[in-house]
Amino acid sequence: MPSGNPVSEFFRRLSKSSAHVFGSAGAFIAAILVVLLWIVTGPIFDFSDTWQLIINTGTTIVTFLMVFLIQATQNRDSLSIHLKLDELIRSIKRARNSMIDLDCLSDEELHHLEEQYQQLNDRRRASRSRQESANPTTAEQPGPVMSQQGEKRI
């Protein structure tokens, strides 16, 4: 679903294709070759200031542009993952639908929610520990057990 803005659509396509191209093994090898070529030309240019300026300027420009492309790609991927998770939460009956809007919460609210989940996890561990100490035979037999009918039970 392309957006109505042609500039946004162009940038979306550019960032997506750039991520694939610049994130490839071929791009990495090309970057190594550029650096090796620069090193080899050092003696030809007597390791002059201009020779050093070429690599400094080139890497600065590439880094500057890549920051925006990487950020755009990460924003898009993050949004896509959020939407997929939102759909999963929405579709599961026992899930708390309030979890869909977590990205709208403040840092303090997220920290409070994290503490709630940590408490749930601590209670689950304590409950499991009590069950194992009350029934030590199950703690000693972690694998599947054969029932009398010959079926595997977990």
Image (cartoon, rainbow, N blue to C red):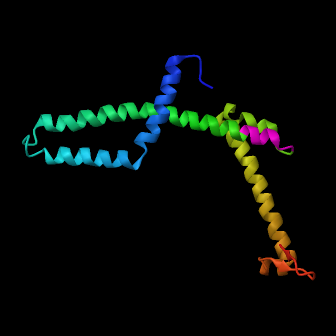
Where's the N terminus, which quadrant? top right
Examine the rendering and report whether any part of residue 124 can be seen: yes
Examine the rendering and report whether any part of residue 71 can be seen: no
Left or right: 132 in relation to 42: right
Label the magenta part by its dominant secondary structure: helix
Q: Residue 14 at what x, y percent from top left?
A: 46, 29
Q: Residue 117 at what x, y percent from top left?
A: 75, 50
Where's the C terminus, which quadrant? bottom right
Q: Residue 88 at what x, y percent from top left?
A: 76, 42
Left or right: 70 in relation to 93: left
What residue appears at the point 69 percent right and 33 percent down from the top-left corner? 105
16 over 147 or under it: above or below: above
24 over 50 or under it: above or below: below
What residue appears at the point 42 percent right and 40 percent down from the top-left corner? 21
Q: Is residue 87 magenta?
A: yes
What residue appears at the point 39 percent right and 50 percent down from the top-left corner? 25
Question: Could you say which quadrant of the image residue 103 lies in?
Answer: top right
What residue occupies the far right of the structure in this picture?
Answer: 149
Q: Is residue 9 magenta?
A: no
Which region is colored magenta?
86-93
What residue appears at the point 28 percent right and 48 percent down from the top-left corner? 32
131 over 96 or under it: above or below: below
